[in-house]
Amino acid sequence: MHQGVGPSFAATFPPRRSRVGEMRRRAASRLREWKVPEQDADGITLAVSELVTNAVIHGKGAVCVVVRQTDGEIRVEVTDGNPQPARVTNAGPDAMSGRGMFLVAVFAHRVEVSDDGYTTTAVFRLTGGR
């Protein structure tokens, strides 16, 4: 089944930590414009933040973020220059990091990694009946 493609935004930037907050704010703003229900937007915005953070910390070279709406879904795609795929880790209770992909997996309907490992995609089903 072919899904209709709706609005989207994309950004490519050098791997700087300051871009994490910028991408989170930009995603939140677009999701409001697209009238995505708040309960969905919160998890999607968190995924943008976590996936961009992973790309900035572990990637190599430029980071590319694409957020797009399709029939009933929002797709968050983050590409970096590291072929090592993002994965859920088991962070200990005292660990200062390592929970980002776990949180993405909890909120997303599914998480996909491209065959080459460069792109991680979190797919969210919208509860608003879109």
Image: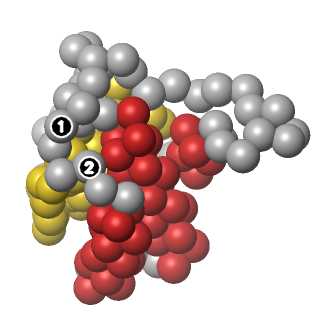
Up/down of 85 relative to 39, above or below: above
Residue 100 visible in the displayed image: yes
Give coordinates of residue 97: x percent, y percent: 65, 43
Quadrant (top left/top right/bottom left/bottom right) for the C terminus = bottom left
Task: Give the residue type at disc 2.
Answer: Pro
Give coordinates of residue 3: x percent, y percent: 18, 46
Left or right: 67, with 106 as reference point: left
Left or right: 93, with 24 as reference point: right
Q: Nearer the viewer, residue 89 or 107?
A: 89
Residue at (36% x, 77% y) in the render: 25
Residue at (55% x, 38% y) in the render: 101
Distance CA(mark 2)–CA(mark 1):
7 Å
Q: Are marks 2 and 1 in contact (CB under 8 Å)?
A: yes
Return the disc, 2 or 1, that comes first in the chain's sequence. Answer: 2
Task: Give the residue type at disc 1.
Answer: Gly
Quadrant (top left/top right/bottom left/bottom right) for the N terminus = top left
Q: Which residue is mark 1?
A: 61
Q: Which mark is residue 15?
A: 2
Residue at (77% x, 40% y) in the render: 95
Give coordinates of residue 118: x percent, y percent: 25, 26
